[in-house]
Amino acid sequence: MGYRGKVVERQQARQLRRTGLPLGEIAERVGVSKSSVSVWVRDVSFDAPAARAVRGRRREPNALQRRKQGEIERLLAEGRARIGQLSEREFLVAGVALYAGEGAKRDGAVKFANSDPRMIAFYCAWLRRFFEIDETRLRVRLYLHQELDLAASTAYWSGLTGIPPSQFQKPYRAVPDPSIRHTKHVHGCVSINYSCSPTHRSIMGLVRALLGGNVHSGVAQPAEQRPVKPFVASSSLAPGAELGD
């Protein structure tokens, strides 16, 4: 059935558009592409307040969305069971891996930047736990869009990191470009800086040891030669337990 044959679907789409439904939801209900709906209803007028009211109503998730959410929740629970409570060594290695991916590599500059408060909190706890840190030398630089609240963001990151606002450097206020992105991190992105060559060299020594290939005998082993220990989805591991035990 071609475009001209979808008379019933076209009529349904136009009727739904008059109620203020968005194009995507109309396409889902009628069972056609969003581009087809756009062509069919482009001359249909509707009441804007009514449309906002329709959009404001919470829709029940469909079967695909329910399966997706169920899988997310199940795998989150499995992830928590597999990670468990980190030992001292595991905490050290996890922080080294985090710094290897996100930290500065130039000699003498211990820097870690991110917009995720969980990663910033983890990094600060790791840095203070495994290295002797002079708290007065810690610095924070904030990257924040111009229309966002600088004072509120400074207070937020100060509370999260435990670094006083007096140790925050001049922030970088970005000019938003709507053609690039529409969503913004409400508290911006922070860089945690600590100028100490011995500390940076100690961290980089750990990074090189971790990535050197000798930490795990199977790291460089081809996948087809490596024995597989599948994780059983319904199982729950105690903290520190080995897969396959």
Image (tube, rainbow, N blue to C red):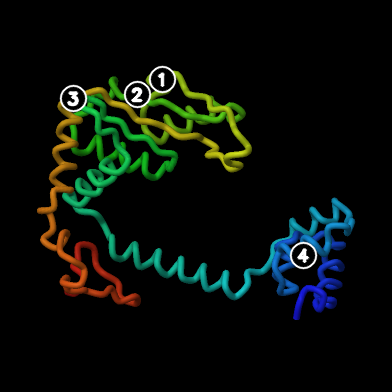
Label pair 2/1, CB-CB below 8 angstroms = yes
Q: Residue at x 85, y 66 (%)?
A: 14
Label pair 3/1, CB-CB below 8 angstroms = no
Decide: few, some or many residues near mark 4? Use Cα within 10 Å; few <14, some 14-19, many ≥20. Answer: many
Which element type, helix, strand or loop, lies under badge 1?
A: loop
In the displayed structure, would residue 68 be above or below residue 106?
below
Residue 178 in percent (x, y) is at: 63, 37
- Marks 3 and 2 sit apart, C-alpha to C-alpha, by 15 Å
Of the residues shown, which amino acid type is indicated by label 3?
A: Ser
Decide: few, some or many residues near mark 3? Use Cα within 10 Å; few <14, some 14-19, many ≥20. Answer: some
Q: Residue at x 24, y 29 (%)?
A: 106
- Marks 4 and 3 sit apart, C-alpha to C-alpha, by 61 Å
The front one of 166 and 65 is 65
Q: Which residue is mark 1?
A: 169
Q: Quadrant of residue 229?
A: bottom left
Residue 47 in percent (x, y) is at: 89, 54
